Amino acid sequence: VIHSAHIERGCLIGIGAIVLNGVRVGTGSIIGAGAVVTKDVPPFSLVVGIPGKCLREVPQTEAADLIEHAKHYYQLALVHAGKGTNLGFSAPG
Protein backbone atom coordinates (compact mmCIF):
# COMPACT_ATOMS: atom_id res chain seq x y z
CA VAL A 1 0.00 0.00 0.00
CA ILE A 2 1.50 3.29 -1.09
CA HIS A 3 -0.36 6.46 -0.23
CA SER A 4 1.01 9.94 -0.93
CA ALA A 5 4.61 8.68 -0.93
CA HIS A 6 7.40 9.40 -3.43
CA ILE A 7 9.05 6.29 -4.88
CA GLU A 8 12.19 7.09 -6.87
CA ARG A 9 13.45 5.22 -9.95
CA GLY A 10 14.45 1.58 -9.75
CA CYS A 11 12.85 0.65 -6.42
CA LEU A 12 11.25 -2.67 -5.56
CA ILE A 13 8.33 -2.60 -3.12
CA GLY A 14 7.57 -6.04 -1.69
CA ILE A 15 4.11 -7.58 -1.51
CA GLY A 16 2.08 -6.32 1.43
CA ALA A 17 4.51 -3.53 2.26
CA ILE A 18 3.06 -0.25 3.50
CA VAL A 19 4.78 3.04 2.70
CA LEU A 20 3.19 5.80 4.78
CA ASN A 21 2.22 9.35 3.77
CA GLY A 22 5.03 11.68 2.79
CA VAL A 23 7.77 9.05 2.88
CA ARG A 24 10.42 9.23 0.14
CA VAL A 25 11.99 5.94 -0.96
CA GLY A 26 15.40 6.63 -2.51
CA THR A 27 16.60 5.40 -5.89
CA GLY A 28 17.43 1.69 -6.12
CA SER A 29 16.00 0.80 -2.72
CA ILE A 30 14.23 -2.43 -1.83
CA ILE A 31 11.34 -2.54 0.64
CA GLY A 32 10.80 -6.04 2.01
CA ALA A 33 7.44 -7.81 1.88
CA GLY A 34 5.21 -6.79 4.78
CA ALA A 35 7.44 -3.91 5.89
CA VAL A 36 5.86 -0.75 7.28
CA VAL A 37 7.95 2.24 6.21
CA THR A 38 7.41 5.29 8.42
CA LYS A 39 10.53 7.35 7.59
CA ASP A 40 12.41 8.39 4.45
CA VAL A 41 14.63 5.69 2.95
CA PRO A 42 18.10 6.66 1.67
CA PRO A 43 19.03 5.62 -1.87
CA PHE A 44 20.25 2.03 -2.32
CA SER A 45 18.86 0.70 0.98
CA LEU A 46 17.21 -2.58 1.95
CA VAL A 47 14.41 -1.90 4.44
CA VAL A 48 12.55 -4.65 6.32
CA GLY A 49 10.34 -5.06 9.37
CA ILE A 50 7.72 -3.22 11.39
CA PRO A 51 8.62 -0.44 11.65
CA GLY A 52 10.91 -0.56 8.62
CA LYS A 53 14.62 -0.48 9.39
CA CYS A 54 17.56 -0.35 7.02
CA LEU A 55 19.18 -3.79 7.04
CA ARG A 56 21.98 -3.07 4.56
CA GLU A 57 23.00 -1.08 1.52
CA VAL A 58 21.98 -2.34 -1.92
CA PRO A 59 25.02 -2.53 -4.24
CA GLN A 60 24.57 -0.49 -7.41
CA THR A 61 24.98 -3.66 -9.49
CA GLU A 62 22.02 -5.21 -7.66
CA ALA A 63 19.99 -2.02 -8.19
CA ALA A 64 20.81 -2.14 -11.92
CA ASP A 65 19.52 -5.73 -11.99
CA LEU A 66 16.18 -4.48 -10.63
CA ILE A 67 15.83 -2.22 -13.68
CA GLU A 68 16.65 -5.09 -16.05
CA HIS A 69 14.10 -7.36 -14.35
CA ALA A 70 11.46 -4.63 -14.65
CA LYS A 71 12.16 -4.33 -18.39
CA HIS A 72 11.74 -8.10 -18.74
CA TYR A 73 8.41 -8.06 -16.87
CA TYR A 74 7.26 -5.22 -19.12
CA GLN A 75 7.98 -7.44 -22.17
CA LEU A 76 6.05 -10.30 -20.58
CA ALA A 77 3.09 -7.98 -19.97
CA LEU A 78 3.08 -6.91 -23.63
CA VAL A 79 3.10 -10.53 -24.79
CA HIS A 80 0.33 -11.42 -22.34
CA ALA A 81 -1.75 -8.48 -23.63
CA GLY A 82 -1.27 -9.68 -27.22
CA LYS A 83 0.88 -6.66 -28.13
CA GLY A 84 4.17 -8.40 -28.65
CA THR A 85 5.87 -11.72 -29.26
CA ASN A 86 9.50 -11.14 -28.31
CA LEU A 87 10.26 -12.49 -24.86
CA GLY A 88 13.98 -11.92 -25.24
CA PHE A 89 14.84 -15.62 -25.06
CA SER A 90 16.63 -17.63 -27.69
CA ALA A 91 15.82 -21.25 -28.46
CA PRO A 92 18.24 -23.79 -26.97
CA GLY A 93 20.60 -25.59 -29.20
Image: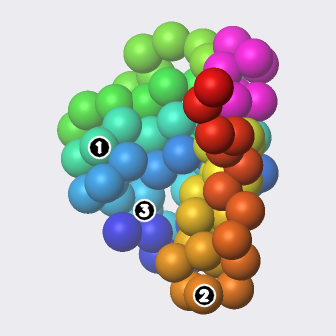
Closest to the camera, between mark 3 and mark 2, is 2
Q: How many marks?
A: 3
Question: x, y percentage for residue 36?
Answer: 31, 48
For marks 2 and 1 on the same chain, the one whose residue lies earlier in the sequence: 1
Region in magenta:
59-65
User: Mark 1: which amino acid?
Assistant: Ala
Between 59 and 75, which is closer to the camera in this rendering? 75
Secondary structure beneath dot 3 equals loop
Left/right placement of residue 89 relative to residue 56 reads: right
Instruction: Using the image, determine if residue 33 lies above or below residue 74.
Output: above
Quadrant occupied by the C terminus? top right
Judging by the rendered image, the residue that carries numbered circle 1 is: 33
Q: Is residue 13 magenta?
A: no
Q: Residue furthest bottom?
A: 82
Residue 20's disc number:
3
The overriding secondary structure of the stretch rendered in magenta is helix
Neighbour class for label 1 at 10 Å: few (<14), some, many (≥20)?
some
Secondary structure beneath dot 2 equals loop
For marks 1 and 3 on the same chain, the one whose residue lies earlier in the sequence: 3
